[in-house]
Image (cartoon, rainbow, N blue to C red):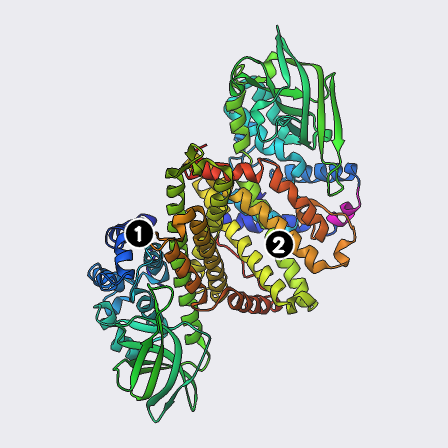
Amino acid sequence: MSLRLSSEDHQAFTHSVAGVLSRECDSSALHAFIDKQAPLDAAVWTRGVELGWLSAVAPGPWGGLDLGVRGADVLFRELGRRAAPGGLVPTLIASLWLSGSGGDELQAAMLPAIVAGETVVAIPVGEPSTRLRLENGRLSGVAPDMLGWSTASVAIAPAVTARGEIFVAVRINGVNAQLSFDSLWDRTRQVGVLRCEAAEPLGIVDDLDGAAARLMRRLTALAIAGDSLGGAREAAEQTISYTKGREQFGRPVAAFQGLKHRIADVMVEIVASEHLLRYALDVVEDGGQDADLWAALAKADACEAYERAAEEAVLLHGGVGFTWAFDCHLFLKRARLNEQLGGDRRRLRDAAADLLRQAAWSDRSTAEIAT
Amino acid sequence: MMLQFIDDEAGFRREVRAWLAKTVPTDWDEHLHRGTAEDFEASQRWWMAELNKVGLGTPHWPPQYGGVDLSLRLQIVLAEEIARAGAPSRSMFQISLNHVPATLLKWGTEYQKAKYLPDVARGVVWCQGFSEPGAGSDLASLKTRAEPCGDHYRINGQKIWSSYSMFAKQAILLARTDVDAPKHAGITYFILDMQADGVEVRPIVQANGQAKFAEIFLTDVRIPVEDRVGEENQGWAVAQTTLSAERGVLSFEQAERLRRVLERFHRQSVAHDAGWLQDAELRRRFMKLFGRMQATRCLIRDLLNQEESSAHAGAITSAHIKIMASTLRKDVGDFLVKVGGMDGQHDHGGMDELSDGPMFVYLSAFAGMIGGGTNEIMRNIIAERGLGMPR
């Protein structure tokens, strides 16, 4: 089990991350990046490395603080809140995955470089796919839907061998291992295709029982849920602030009950989703049997809350909410992409339903909360 | 016996569970499905008496009024075990057990505490006379008059939505003592004897067929001065204490019961391979509700932990819980009705928190969205007090 921060330390960590990002990844910096006028992705990455964000989640032996998913959640929320561009999110997920599933060799090959900020990693976020094959120690084929960044130097992806399913890590060398990205509506993210042609893998992890794949899905779900709730809060807060300042009919539009109730409903949904995510994080961190179920449900609700908060942000800002210059559309696009990363809500709730049914067969409750 | 374990959580839980197993008949709620109001009353009184026999009637009260200052942790354990056992709720005693002690312990005179609290602990039913036909969400606009007449007040007016008032011996009452003052500043808080001359209770039949609330007509009713709670015209402040007692362990227990309803329904569906499990949209809808159930339980635990730290944060969290829990209950009812198909339309009666009769759960759920401050008022609280949006 990872280290659990005291609530004071957790708050201090949140405060520190939030403070740095609110200064260096604020709305104007974000818009400059979107408009290709400033390399905010590189700036956020460099700052994160300097401040030890990548070492925060890595295990102790690799120079990390071992804060686990609860520690990583602080970063996901704040990066989501600022809709931060770059490779931090997939790299953090990769670091958590390596810590849990990687095996000594692969951990040694990758974690020190991740902690040092030298490696940006791409990870699989699409439907389970094994179109990569390992034969005679060489990897060939295609892996779609890789969440990464143009600076990614390693990709982790599922593959098959003659003896069954595996995960491979492969260095992106631009020759026989290439990662190519198409532009997305969400400019703060890059999702691309990994193509390998007899590439030599950096490392291999057997996954005959599917545990490594489940861990990747679980971590992605938690990460994107955190990102979504950070973004949802910011979208809601910007909307509240805007409606307090915008006057029509001689009063701030925030005074109209129709608007208040819509915003209150957004907040209720956000708060509910935050509690579900916190519960899921605890179950995952405690190694609970139902970790996959709660991570899936938490991500489904978080993305729903984000979508709603972002839609209401556009609408309650009125005309300016539809402009490029405001942030609303950035949240809306990130929300819709988040829904697709690591499975949409239908897929996640179907997976959770299967798990709940299995628990019911064995007459076991999945909903115990330690008091 | 169980109270010997108040320093040992695991032991307390074990003892409570064992006691519930031997005390609560498995079919007690079946009898009430078609029962009368009198059956319901008798069942409630029986359950209160059973709890009192073992010191679990009002264990969280101070020792001088019959409790043992049971810690919040153990109150939670007790509520969890009661929900787990499917034991009766004590809805008829909701005002007696929560609102009355919260109010009297803070505002009551020694005479009032000594006179009323021991009876409440023994199972005397109280009701609340706050709302009026013309004063619902805008409670402070209430018009029931209380005129000072020397050693007593003379009360005239009408109260409504007063739950269990047909079974009540006493009521907490708000009435106007100053018609010229601003509306919040002219209200006084009283204890009303429901047997007094001039008090008439007329039950109101609800959408779910039950008649658990009523109108109270007050005609020249005398209330002695010693039954005034707080000073004259200070009633609004006293009432805030009463209203804040609506949150906490009570909503905790309700959420735990809803969890049991959902889990039992799911287990039975799986056991019988119910058709809705094959329907992707219904299955996903159920999982959404299952997640919200858990989120609500987590939020309520949060409130209980923060209760003493900040009254303001508590009020906002309570508003969130009110909306989440009541909406969830309605959505669960809606789900059960959809899944129930034609069968779900048959009326087999029902018993509050314990029933999973589809239409009964569904219909009853609306009460939770309207009563105790409508969800619209809760949205105002979240927006205005929580988010600082202007009035």
Identity of the residue drawn at 63% across and 49% down: B330
Identity of the residue drawn at 43% across and 89% down: A163
How busy is the neighbourhood of tag 1: few (under 14 within 10 Å), some, or many (20 plus)?
some
Classify B7 as above or below A72. above
| Residue B192 spot, x, y in % from top left | 65, 20
Q: Chain of mark 1?
A: A
Q: Chain of mark 2?
A: B
Magenta stretch: residue B32 in it? yes
Q: Is residue A195 left or right of residue B55?
A: left
| Residue A59 spot, x, y in % from top left | 29, 67
Q: Which residue is mark 1?
A: A14
The magenta region covers: B28-35
- Along the line of sight, which residue is nearer the eye, B198 or A117? A117
Identity of the residue drawn at 70% across and 50% down: B355
Closer mark to the observer between disc 2 and disc 1? 1
| Residue B140 spot, x, y in % from top left | 56, 24
Q: Which residue is mark 2?
A: B260
Amino acid at circle 1: Thr
